[in-house]
Image (cartoon, rainbow, N blue to C red):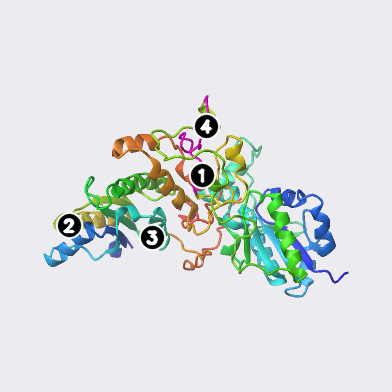
Amino acid sequence: MAENFEPVIIGFTCNWCSYRAADLAGTARVKYPANIRLIRMMCSGRLDPAFVLKAFANGADGVMISGCHPGECHYLEQNYKALRRYLLLRRTLTQMGIEPGRLKLVWASAAEGVRLAEEITKMVEEVRALGPLHWPMLKAKNGHPVEVEAEAEEVKA
Amino acid sequence: MTDKPKFAMYWAASCGGCEIAVLNIGEKILDVDANFEVVFWPVAMDAKYKDVEAMPDKSILLTLFNGGMRNKENEEIARLLRRKSQILVAFGSCACEGCIPGLANFSNLDEIFKAAYDSVSTVNPEHIRPVPNYQMPEGMIHIPEMNPILKTLDQVVDVDYYMPGCPPESHQIAAVIDLVIKVLHGEATLPPKGATIGVGVSTVCDDCPRERNVKTIKEFKRIQLMSQIDDKLCLLEQGIPCNGPATRQGCGALCPQAGAQCIGCYGPAEGVVDYGARLMAAFASVIDSNDPDEIDRILDGIPDPAGQFYRFSLAGSLLRSSKTAWDK
């Protein structure tokens, strides 16, 4: 299974820096793996930890959060807020059995297309090495996808 | 038999506190009796599942269902009562979001059985474990199979209303019963399907009389290790991890008023998708540091973040369990 495994990584990018860095990587024809799906936000501070949990719950193998370098936030210091949420989230996820390597925080300015592409490539390989996560899905009141759960295994006497 | 509307209450994986809370409504229980015929309530009266099976579909007007889906029996009765009831209420934190029994979702069945049947709490020298089917001389006996992951009621059947709380406060239960009786007499209408009832729309903080300022936290502390607690000031501001900011209003902020932090039994506030995520966002926002090492040091003050953030809501959260619970 692991040989054909292509990890799915959700990338949350900031409108003012990392999204533009990805754009720059595109115009400069810098290659990075197609495993990452970028989602643009206005700021990394907009990142609700629920976004990350939802990504994992719905089948992502990894999540990358990226924002402006410390001190360069377009909204003063919201990227520090993202940093604090990331550090707390990582602790909680570890307890839930999600390896710390599946969640990554990357600072990238609008000029760092090459650096962002490198970080993405690196993360894809790291998550590939960790293997698939495949969190089981189940319907909840907010309409998340349904997947039939494996029957309970018989517990031996 | 009377032609009064029929009422049922059932418990799945729960402690029984919800039924106590219902009885705790005082003389209001006489109104329940005057307006309803209680047809099925295993805690309070004798009834058999086959009596319920024999009832016509939709013949029970109101069913309060408490408890999570720990085993196949819970699920079977949830489906049965869904079929027989017009209004099915997920009653109490267990049915809404898993509550304390849902904390078992941090472990797999093996670990759960080990803790229950092979730890210091149990004398079991032959390591006997329950099995779903067992051959006795008199014939095969069956017990319900355990679910590997405890589910909430709405993960198994369609739910009309949610009434959170561990347990729901008696005055809230009384208000809901009053409302249903008014609806019966045509004096009120039911809230839209899927609504959370017997609660406020805001958070516990809005009921809390403690003084709130801008929060800047340099250290998280455990309340039991503190010698002095300011009884006027917000607990979170004092560094006590209080779950009030994400918890639904409804209890009247009982715990913070008594000098204990909110632990979140009323579940997520209106519009919150994942209770723990909202709390993580709130706690991380008030930490007064921009230095990764210092932030890590401050976060060390919350030794069990998953337990802190998902004490009551693990089974109903986005991830629902830890990987241990489902990974083979």
Give the spatial CA distance, label 3 vs label 4.
34 Å
Q: Which residue is mark 3?
A: A55
Looking at the picture, which amino acid does disc 1 mark?
Asn
Asked if A142 appears above or below A112 in the picture, the reply is: below
Residue span colored magenta: B227-245
Q: Which residue is mark 2?
A: A110
Q: Which residue is mark 1?
A: B243
As helix, strand or loop, the secondary structure at mark 1 comes to: loop
N-terminal of the pair, mark 1 or mark 4, is: 4
Instruction: Give how far across and how far down residue B291 sits, in percent.
Output: 28, 38
Q: Residue furthest right?
A: B1
Out of B9 and A122, give the one closest to the viewer: B9
- Chain bearing mark 3: A
Q: Is residue B141 visible?
A: no
Task: Indicate which disc residue B282 carries.
Answer: none
A31 relative to A80 in the view: left or right: left
Give the spatial CA distance, label 4 vs label 2.
45 Å
Out of A90 and B71, give the one closest to the viewer: A90
Q: Residue furthest bottom?
A: B56
As helix, strand or loop, the secondary structure at mark 3 comes to: helix
Task: Point out the frontmost of discs 3 and 2.
Answer: 2
Q: Are marks 1 and 4 in contact (CB under 8 Å)?
A: no
Q: Which residue is mark 4?
A: B223
Asked if A51 appears above or below B225 in the picture, the reply is: below
Asked if B16 appears above or below A133 in the picture, the reply is: above
Specify few, some or many for label 2: CA neighbours under 10 Å numbering under 14, 14-19, or 20 or more.
many
Q: Is residue B237 magenta?
A: yes
- Chain bearing mark 1: B
Prevailing secondary structure class for the magenta stretch in the rendered image: loop
